[in-house]
Image: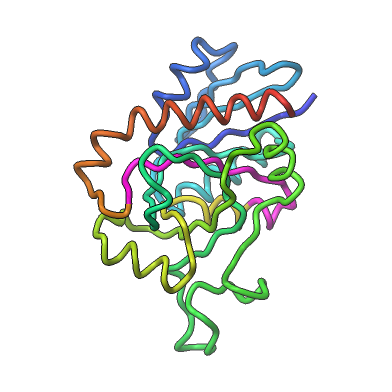
């Protein structure tokens, strides 16, 4: 039996609609945690809120409080290429923390944390490979992660051109960095809610359906763990 922690930034209604009434709703200072049974495993669903800091704090909370065996994050993202069109679902292979920048102090590349050999921070290969056994059609992607909602086409193109990233969002770096620090594997499944030419209006129109698609696919993968 495993304890699985699910971090949800803004798509909590999709998760609650999928899993229904929890076995337990656990109340902590700053958090409500919804506990479910997923096959033989325990699933702890938590609403982190948006942004890297919130995501990192929530990841550490799940690891420390529930001794989770691994962390999963599903959610909606912006597409940075024409291939990553609306409602395309993907699996994150690596993350670049594009708004982390110590280059003026140490001369390293923008986005690089010095404990890593490059700007690309890998997710857990074994978990990614196992997820792809269940859903082999999922595209492996590079995720540009930072504390800003990116709506403009020009900025999306820039992130792709600089980092070769396929998608962008606001929590992945916080989750992956925290998991790696704790030596806890992680899985990130994302569905595009706004394409490279789409902006805030496309996001608002598509966010609920994209979140529903994403939790359905994530749940299918988790049932094979």
Residue at x 60%, y 27% (from the top left corner): 44
Question: The N terminus appears in which quarter of the rendering?
Answer: top right
State the image coordinates of residue 149 (x, y, percent, origin top left). Answer: 31, 54
State the image coordinates of residue 215 (x, y, percent, origin top left). Answer: 50, 28
State the image coordinates of residue 145 (x, y, percent, origin top left). Answer: 45, 58
Magenta residue check for 105 = no
Residue 196's image quarter?
Answer: bottom left
Task: Say whether residue 100 is left or right of residue 184.
Answer: left
Compared with 131, 164 (above or below) is: below
Task: Say whether residue 1 is left or right of residue 142.
Answer: right
Residue at x 72%, y 26% (from the top left corner): 224
Span colored in magenta: 179-195
Compared with 35, 21 (above or below) is: above
Given the current orientation, which residue lies at the most extreme left position?
201
Task: Say whether residue 8 is left or right of residue 66.
Answer: left
Name the colouring of the figure.
rainbow
Residue 159 or residue 38, whichever sits in front: 159
Residue 90 or residue 102, whichever sits in front: 90
State the image coordinates of residue 192 (x, y, percent, origin top left). Answer: 40, 43
Magenta residue check for 183 = yes
Compared with 152, 10 (above or below) is: above
Residue at x 33%, y 58% (from the top left corner): 148
Compared with 93, 26 (above or below) is: above
Given the current orientation, which residue lies at the most extreme right position?
1
């Amino acid at each position: 039996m495993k304890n699985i922690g699910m971090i949800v930034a803004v798509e909590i209604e999709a998760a609650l609609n999928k899993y229904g009434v929890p076995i337990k709703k656990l109340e902590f200072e700053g958090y409500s945690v919804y506990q479910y049974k997923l096959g033989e495993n325990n699933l702890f669903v938590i609403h982190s809120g948006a942004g890297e800091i919130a995501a990192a704090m929530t990841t550490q909370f799940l690891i420390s409080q529930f001794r989770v065996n691994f962390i999963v994050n599903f959610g909606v993202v912006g597409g940075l290429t024409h291939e990553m069109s609306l409602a395309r679902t993907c699996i994150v292979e690596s993350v670049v923390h594009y708004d982390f920048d110590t280059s003026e102090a140490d001369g390293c590349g923008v986005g690089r944390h010095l404990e890593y050999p490059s700007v690309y921070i890998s997710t857990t290969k074994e978990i990614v490979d196992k997820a792809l056994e269940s859903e082999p059609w999922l595209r492996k992607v590079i995720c540009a992660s930072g504390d800003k909602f990116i709506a403009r086409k020009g900025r999306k193109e820039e992130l792709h051109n600089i980092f070769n990233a396929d998608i962008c969002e606001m929590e992945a770096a916080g989750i992956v960095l925290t998991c790696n620090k704790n030596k806890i594997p992680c899985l990130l499944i994302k569905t595009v809610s706004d394409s490279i030419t789409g902006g805030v209006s496309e996001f608002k129109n598509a966010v609920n359906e994209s979140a529903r698609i994403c939790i359905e696919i994530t749940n299918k993968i988790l049932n094979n763990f």
